[in-house]
Each structure stands twice: as C-alpha cells, then as structure tokens.
Image (spheres, rainbow, N blue to C red):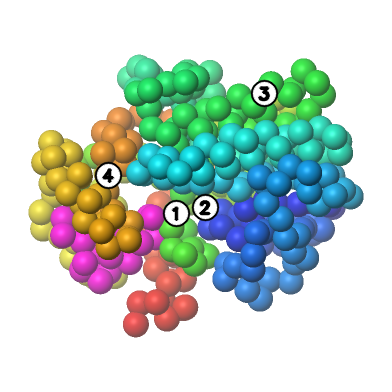
Amino acid sequence: MKRILVTGAGGHLGSNLVRELLAQGHAVTAMVRREKPALAGVDVPRAFGDVMEADSLPALFEGHEVVMHLAGRISIVGDPNGAVRAVNVQGTDNVARACLRSGARMVHCSSIHAFDLWAHGPDSMDETGPRVPAESTTHTAYDLSKADGERVVRALLPEGLDAVIAHPTGVLGPHDYDPSRMGQVFLDLYRGSLPSLVQGGFDFVDIRDVVLGLAACVERGATGQSYLMSGRYVTIPELGQMAQAVTGRRPPWFTSPMWLARMAAPLFQGWAQMRGSEPLYTGESLSTLRRRCTVDSSKARRELGFVSRDLQDSVRDLYAWFDARGVLR
C-alpha cells in the first residue's frame, strides 16, 4: 500500500485512476482545483490546489510517497491564451520540482503526442522514437507542450528526481463525465447529430487499461523510463461501425475525404467560435488523423504487465455507462 496523490484527479483519466488505486488498496488523495462530478460519491480525500501555484505544492505533496501527475490541458485549436503551454510545461515543472524536494516518486502521464509522428518512418514506433523538436513551429501547440513537458521532467533526473513517464495513445471508456472529445463523438453517433464521418484514424486504447498501466508504474516502472500504452489503430469509419454494432444506430452515410475536411475545417472552427462551442474538427485534429503509425507497447507489456482489450468491448462498455447514467434517454 502506497500513499499516492493524483493531480488532475477530476478528469476522465484521473477519476478512473483514482478508482483503480483505491480498489488496489492504496491510500489516495485526489488533487483538484474544485469539486468535480467525476469524483461524486468516491470516498477519497481532496487536496484543493493548482499545479500553477508552485509554492503551495510542497505542503500538498507532504506525506505522499508517489505523485501521479495527470493535470493537463488538451487543445485542438492552438494555444490562444497560453494556458496549454503554461499548464503542460510550467505546471509539470512545478510538480517535478516539488516531487524532487519531497522525495516522492513522480509518475508523469505524458502522451503519444510528445512523439514526432511525422518524422517517424513506416515501421512500428517504440519509446526510442523522436520527440517533437523543441521550439517547433510546424507542430501543434499541444504536441509541443507535451514534448516540452517530458523534457522538463527529464532535466531533473540528474538531480535525483525519481520519475517514470507514461505515453498513452487516444483513450476512451467509462466514467466520461464531461464528456471527453471522443465521448462526445460516440454520443453524437448515437443521436445522429454528426453531419459526416471523416477519413483517417488513430490508435485508441481503453482508459481502464491505461490506468492499470499507470498503477503498475508506481512500483514496477523504472526511473527515467518512458512507456508507450497503446491499443490499436482504427479508422473513424470503423469506430462508427463499432458504435452501430452496440447501439443499432447507423453512422452517417457520407465519409468526407481528407482534402474536403481540411477545406471545411476553418468554417467549422469559425462557426464554433461564434457559438462559443467546441468545433467538430480543426486542421490540428485532422493532422493527427492523417498520420498512420503502429505503436509498439511491448516494453510496457514486458515491464509493467500492460495489456489492451478489444476496442469493441470498450465501445460497448462506454455506451453501457452512458445508458446507466441516463445520458442516452
């Protein structure tokens, strides 16, 4: 049993991780900026704080043997107010320095987006793959922030920081309260509100498999090592078929070719901006869907016991969870 603090505990990944750590018998503290629906009914102490408030972190981390850092900002629209870089880089640096000071092990949840997928060849990618270059002007703000976040953690390893870095691919699964962007896609598929599908795809993994991998990092992860946690590559039309197999609802009949989706992306983004909502897709998200890459998780399987279940089961369980909450009615 370990005393573990989880930053970003109220998010999709964080709330799933808190539940798993509690089930494993750990003494868990959920660090959140404010009370979140994802933790409603979960009997876990809260530590109210912000990773951007560096001076407050040592007191919050005191008494914890492990800090699992999941707090972050996701964006498909750049970084117009600087919050993506601030949280994902400076916030990560603040957490890493507080862990170094307290002696806590840091399990840093980075992302597949820290890797330069465009520089990678056709072969399977592993942890030795190139990262997004520092100060890149051709990659998205989010991708660069995840790569730089990893770099600030690694910069403190020579000073004695005990850190392990996890790189999950796209996650989906239950306890998706907000919902996440992928959760919203599956709701839109059920409701018939998607105007079309789009060509391209990505590597997706069940969120429950990722949290088991993260939990294994607590004791089995090697200091200074990265671990890729992937499921399998699926196209967006294939996801539509998976959803139909569970719900019986037909996905949109039209699948937009990538060139047409890229032409329409500024219109979707502008319309969403006027409405104050999330765009259906942007040039940044389409760029991600355009790069097919096989992700090798053999290192995580070998050293952490990581496994990934069939994505059809993930889609089924996500819809079952939505249904149990009354979201599908």
Q: Which residue is mark 3?
A: 154
Q: Earlier in the sequence, mark 1 or mark 2?
A: 1
x 33%, y 66%: residue: 187
Q: Earlier in the sequence, mark 3 or mark 2?
A: 3
Q: Amino acid at mark 1?
A: Leu
Q: Nearer the viewer, mark 4 or mark 2?
A: 4
Packing grade of label 3 (10 A; few <14, some 14-19, many >=20) is: many
x 47%, y 21%: residue: 135
Looking at the figure, which quarter contains the C terminus? bottom left
Q: Amino acid at mark 3?
A: Arg
Q: Is residue 242 magenta?
A: no
First to last magenta residue range: 181-197
**What is the spatial separation of the Cα atoms under label 4 and label 1, in whole angstroms?**
20 Å
> Is residue 13 placed above or below 80 in the rendered structure?
below
Q: Is residue 37 left or right of residue 324?
A: right
**What is the spatial separation of the Cα atoms under label 4 and label 2, in whole angstroms?**
24 Å
x 10%, y 54%: residue: 254
